[in-house]
Amino acid sequence: MIYHLLRYLHESRGDPLLHFYAYQNVLFRSVAAVLTSFAIAIGTGPFIIRWLMRMKIGDRPEFHHAALNELTREKANTPTMGGLIIILAIVVTTLLWADLDNPFVRKSFVLIVWFGILGGIDDWLKLTAQSRQRSRDGLVAWEKLIFQIAGAVLISSFLYMDFASVSDGRKFWVPLYDKGLPLATWMFVLIAIFYISATSNAVNLADGMDGLAAGCLGMVSFVLIVLCYVVSETMTRGAPIPISEPAIAETLGQSVSYEPITWSQYLLLPHIPLAGELAIFFAAILGAVLGFLWYNCHPAQTFMGDVGSLPLGAAMGYGALVTRNEILLLVIGGVFVMELMSVVLQVGYFKYTGGRRLFRCAPLHHHFHLAGWSEPQVVVRFWLLSAAFAALALATLKIR
């Protein structure tokens, strides 16, 4: 709303804001979005936490591991569904600072609301349902998966139509290779289903320790801000030229002309016009998770719950789809990949060996907790790994 108000004032003759152009810059509004989202999360956190406590929406950690239950018993009755703080901050901030006419921004709203409602229903059934059969399990796995797939199909179908006039948008891009591979419609949708469903579940699995998921999401969001910007925005007013050429031109008394160039051309990335506006959405996520960490750091005053982890994970997959960096997301979200794969390997190994375990407990953060690491040690060390994965992902842009 702020963006559209400033644009209206800018276009109005005689208005004192006529020459204020900073609002047009995506990076300026991204910084504003981080600060706004952070402030909203900090400001609304106490009210939402008190409401959750009044509603008695508290967690009751229960694992199929006696030692882990003992380690987490102090978390009993900590308010869950704190992800509402994050979702509120993201939605309000994006409404304030983003261009709401942008098709990618509109779909981000559908995504965050769809998966937020799905996670909220799952949390509500888990934590408040009176039925003994439903009180602990929430939605059955196949029920949740159906809605995840339905959301992914809806988003990817419209996204593929948006890419009708964007040649790079309908290709599959591999890091360190500067040519995209053409995708048929069904392949594009299938990849979207896999990524959005997998990333939403991966973040959900990582949401098991104070600050773990939120801290790692902040780093992934930062990289996606960069990606959204570089695949869309213009780099300079002109293309880089060899050092010798200006000197030759000056000697000959000739002017040197420059051709416009985008960051995507310079870095050999897919060029996705209008994707830069989505940087504001991920900036809102960054600010929201940082604000949420204020209340979620050890010892946590609230937990994220499915209402936060499912939409945030889906948003990570959506960012990779829009920027056409699905493979690179596996590096950016390396910690989430580790968490997801630890569960897959644990279940597969357990069934294959008839009851033996590959890890002490899965997801992976519980394995290290049972190995003797304190909870803050596990969280901070996973943050460090996430930062390393993010740095590696950014390095591949230049290597390409």
Image (cartoon, rainbow, N blue to C red):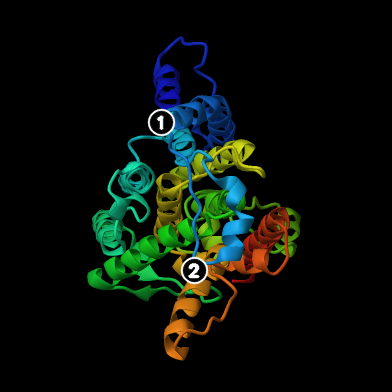
Q: Where is residue 311 in the image (x, y as percent from the top left)?
A: 40, 49
Residue 61 appears left or right of 301 = left
Cα distance in 3D space between marks 1 and 2? 32 Å
Residue 305 appears left or right of 128 = right
**Of the residues shown, which amino acid type is indicated by label 1?**
Met
Image quadrant holding the N terminus, namely top left
Crowd around label 1: few <14 · some 14–19 · many ≥20 (10 Å): few
**Of the residues shown, which amino acid type is indicated by label 2?**
Leu
Residue 252 appears left or right of 13 = right
The quadrant where residue 142 appears: bottom left
Residue 105 in view, yes or no: yes
Tell me, for residue 55, which label it has, or none: 1
Name the residue: 57% across, 52% down: 226
> Considering depth in this image, is 321 or 253 the residue closer to the camera?
321
For label 2, the residue is 340
The quadrant where residue 117 appears: top left
Name the residue: 53% across, 20% down: 19
